[in-house]
Image (cartoon, rainbow, N blue to C red):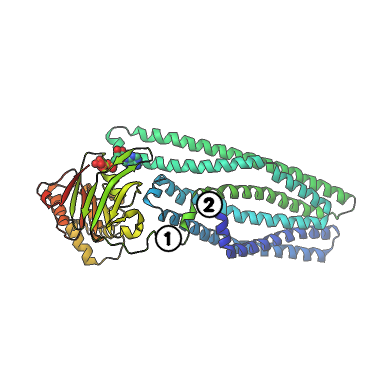
Amino acid sequence: MVFKTIKKFWKYNFLLTFLITLESGGIILSTVYLSKIMDSLINSDKYAFLESFAISLFLWLIALILGYIKNIHVEYAKQKQVLYIRNKILSSISVKSYEEFHEKQINEYISWLTLDINTLEEQCFGNFYLAISSFTLIVFSAIAILKFSYVLLIIAIVAAIIMTIVPNRLRKQLDIKNTSLSKKYEKYISKVDEWIKGFPTLISYNKNYLLKQQLNIENEKIANLKSDLGKTKAIINSIIRFLSVVFQYSIIFVTGIFVLSGRLSGGVIFSIGDLTGNFFGNMSFFINEVTMFFSTSKIIDKINFDNSLDVPRIPLNDNEFTFFNQIKIKNLEYDFPNSQKILIPDMNFIKGGKYAILGKSGTGKTTFLNILSKNLGYTKGTIEIDGQNINNIDTKKYRDKISYVKQKPYIFDLSLFDNVTLLDNFDKEKVEKIIDKIELTDLENIDSLGLFGKNISGGQAQRVEIGRSLIQEKDILLIDEGTSNLDSETSYIIEKAILLNPELTVIFVTHHLNPVLEKMFTDIYEF
Ligand SMILES: Nc1ncnc2c1ncn2[C@@H]1O[C@H](COP(=O)(O)OP(=O)(O)OP(=O)(O)O)[C@@H](O)[C@H]1O
């Protein structure tokens, strides 16, 4: 994904490589002029001294200006590319079905969008531009060294090869450790989320200490992994630095011999000192940067981007789906991955009918509603709507006809209005009518209901969920104990309003069937 991104933004990257190359050229050329400055001093040549001094300074200033322009654009290009990957991650999540989404822990997704993307930004893209800069400095230093003596260049090249090969095995270890740290972070976020959210429960059982105890176990694991990773990085760094010092001194030694034997002028020793410093310094930077670039670019590869291709998935059946007559459930069975089996009784739901589903806890009522709303796919038995198996109906079109009030309502950190409309453009009057119907007018002026509905009661949250499904005006309404937290008077008012809608087909899972409303149901099924 990282390479694809770099390719996609090739114009920026090409421009930056060009700027970096010019900057590096300026730096190295000014260094070459150092030997000229020294030679002019040795020869007491005033004019040559002034000329080479001015050129060297001028080249440095140019390199500084180019560096400034480059730095600004590096940040811009980095952000563009990170934004692109963020968007790709969001697309890959957005196209997931209910089942696909639940294959992973929710916090893994959060980790992709926070920790992983930050690692990419800092360590991967950051190192990419640094590596280009180091590489161009190495190449220009090599050319400059060649200008003085090919023997010196041969030593430099041999050194470069050795420095690249020696810590190779350690580099592979670094890859593995980086990937396992990223996975550990995903689990860590899950744990933090789990125990922080559960803290109010811990308080009421006087078990506050569990928060520290449980999270400290994870903290220690992360700390150990990080220090282990740091050790590997430090060893690689030290090996490269050691080799670079050895080779740098070798070159200065050989240059010294060449100067003493008259093959090179005395001033060269000054340039060669800087050039080898540049060559080996940047060689060790380059190796580190490339190592980090490759090891962190793999972090994002665990995300399956294939499903986020810009083309939409091909619908199973392109025909508009309309519900005319009846839904038939026959021999339906659901097997959970842990081999838990749910057997669902045969049922018929006629259009406009009102149905109650009763049954003991754990008998599969929620599972059935999840299958009927196409959240879960089924393999055994059939669900037919007007004779058409729902497996053959395009999921999006199917959901345009069906609303599902879940057992546990989810409230966003938005106003009541936005929570009901889910940011859709509904007519204001229509929304107000619904808010009135679910008896929540007193919440209308609150800025936000709070994350997970922390500013409202459990019963109010349930009513928001009901309002959300009613405003959509779908043909079929599934309710999973949607009024269980309401007082009997409010639940009576709301249930009655729903049951009085002649167009709506209602399938209502409940443990508290109101005896007065019982006669309004077309049929009652028992699980
Ligand atoms: N993701 C899952 N993996 C494995 N088993 C599950 C999963 N979800 C539910 N179950 C099991 O399936 C059974 C049916 O659960 P379901 O939530 O459908 O029951 P229910 O009738 O709606 O219960 P309640 O009335 O308490 O809401 C339960 O025994 C539950 O343990």
Query: SS class of the residue under badge 2?
Result: helix
Tag 2: amino acid: Leu
Picture coordinates of residue 56, whole percent (x, y): 74, 62
Seen at 34% across and 48% down, the residue is 376
Q: Within 8 Å: ligand 1 and the Cβ of disc 1?
A: no
Quadrant of image for the C terminus: top left
Answer with the quarter of the image where residue 506 lies. Answer: bottom left
- Residue 51: % across, % down: 78, 66
Disc 1 secondary structure class: loop
2 or 1: mark nearer the eye: 1
In the foreground, 334 or 22: 334
* Quadrant housing the N terminus: bottom right
At x 34%, y 57%, the residue is 393
Observer-nearest residue: 464 or 379? 379
User: Residue 510 placed where, x, y %?
Assistant: 20, 45
In the rendered image, residue 323, in percent from the top left (x then y), is placed at 26, 60
Image disc number at residue 432: none
Ranked by sequence position, the earlier of labels 2 and 1 is 2
From the viewer's perspective, is residue 339 above or below residue 159? above
* Residue 118 visible in the snapshot: yes
Mark 2 neighbour density, 10 Å: few (under 14) some (14–19) many (20 or more): many
- Residue that extends furthest to the left in the rendered view of this protein: 516
Query: Which residue type does callout 1 highlight?
Result: Ile
CB at disc 2 and ligand 1 closer than 8 Å: no
Residue 120: numbered disc: 2
Q: Is residue 67 left or right of residue 113?
A: right
CA gap, disc 2 to disc 1? 32 Å
Which residue is under mark 1?
Answer: 314
Residue visible at 73% across and 47% down in the picture = 161
Instruction: Determine which quarter of the picture holds residue 431.
Output: bottom left
